[in-house]
Image (spheres, rainbow, N blue to C red):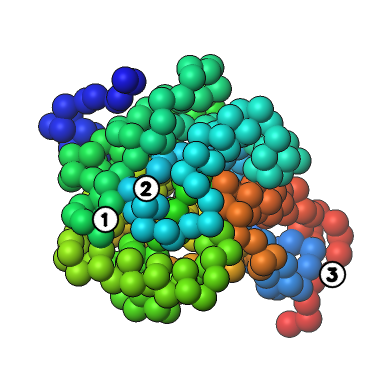
Amino acid sequence: MNMTTVSSTTDAATLDQVCSAIGPLNESAMEAARARQGTLTKPAGSLGRLEELSIQLAGITGTDIPEAPMKSAVIVMAGDHGVAAEGVSLFPQEVTPQMVFTFIGGGAGINVLARHVGADVIVVDVGVAAELEEHPLIRSKKVALGTQNMTQGPAMTREQAVRALCVGIEVAREQIDAGVQIFGTGDMGIANTTPSAALTAVIAGGSPEDVTGRGTGIDDDALNNKVDVIKRAIAVNQPDPRDGIDTLAKVGGFEIAGLAGVILAAAAARVPVVIDGFISGAAALVACAIEPKAKSYLIPAHQSVEVGHKTAMNHLELKPLLNLGLRLGEGTGAAMAISIVQSAAKILAEMATFADAGVSGAKE
């Protein structure tokens, strides 16, 4: 059995080190970028969110005119959930490993969209409930064979939660060392909208009824059951909303933890992270509960159809770039939004100023 084993002391030290390295955005770089936006050949503010993104990128990178982050990677974390036994998904758990092999075969939605924007797809087994055949395109970082059924107790131990967070940290660092300048987050795990809704309810303060959606397309009876499952899980475990790791361990998932680790490591390295939909949003809630300064490094890709995603984004005070009715996950929305971030950087760097172009500016 190929399980990732690192001492809990080492993992805790790694997590503390990463969190302590996360600082605020560089205000002087942001001010310089803001000033340059005011000199470009356009009415002030006419490029809206592109202008805002370019200023955020300056703050993240600490560079007045940041280069477009062209080397990109979408990290797809895969894990299974014991709560699937409660009938919360239309699909059987066997789909998770099947989709992992679809990802590495290049045939999934995320592969198509990542190819379109030139992003690598990095597939990580952090907790699939099956022993996967070894493959060079699968990062085998399995913490356990899926989580436990959270209606009967914690989904994972605190040590497992920290280990899964560190899996994300390790993968992100590996990619940063390879030159990655911007991340997208993606997920795979049958039933993972259930722990995502539970995390959103606890951390963002929404009621289970208000943050629980239909996931794979369940009917009304199944939706009512799903809400009841989440209520029971929260009641049984009593997660502490002030403790992101406690909440993650009790009602979270391994792939959600892995994505939260990616977010924290990227923020520590001053690398932007484009977060996908509901599951990535839950991971962002966890990451920011652990270290609030990580929020400044997040770029929300799109507004998911899943109802709880809006609650998560409102809690984090983030406004998604796109609204295309997506609910697939995998990082599909993140891949599309990476190109928007690249466009924002290019506007700041490559657009002519009024002085450069000999164009008259606005009247005084």
Image location of residue 87, percent across then percent down: 42, 59
Write down the quadrant of residue 74 in the picture: top right
Tell me, for residue 228, which label it has, or none: none
Q: Earlier in the sequence, mark 3 or mark 1?
A: 1
Residue contact between numbered discs 1 and 2, judged by CB atoms under 8 Å: yes
Q: Position of residue 103 (x, y in %)?
A: 61, 34
| Cα distance between the residues tagged 1 and 2 | 9 Å
Task: Relative to 313, say whether 56 is above or below.
Answer: above
Classify 10 Å Cα crowding around label 2: few (below 14), some (14-19), many (20 and above).
many
Q: Which residue is mark 3?
A: 360
Please report the residue visible at 50 percent of the width from the left and 39 percent of the height from the top: 94
Question: Visible in this render: residue 356?
Answer: yes
Identify residue for label 2.
81
Question: Between marks 2 and 3, how big is the CA–CA gap?
Answer: 61 Å
Labels 3 and 1 touching (C-beta < 8 A) = no
Work out how far the residue at label 3 is from the one at label 1, CA to CA, in angstroms: 64 Å
Image depth: mark 3 or mark 1 in front: 1
User: The residue under label 3 is which amino acid type?
Assistant: Ser
Is residue 24 visible in the rendered image? The answer is: no
Residue drawn at the location 31% of the way across and 75% of the way down: 205
Residue at far bottom of view: 364
Q: Residues within 10 Å of mark 1 (few under 14, many from 20)?
A: many
Instruction: Say which amino acid is labelled 1.
Output: Met
In the rendered image, the quadrant that contains the C terminus is bottom right
| Lateral position of residue 302 relative to residue 173, left or right | right
Is 241 displayed left or right of 311 in the figure? Answer: left
Tell me the SS state at disc 2.
loop
Are the residues flagged by discs 2 and 3 in contact, CB closer than 8 Å? no
> Which residue is tagged 1?
150
Residue 71 at x, y = what percent?
62, 34
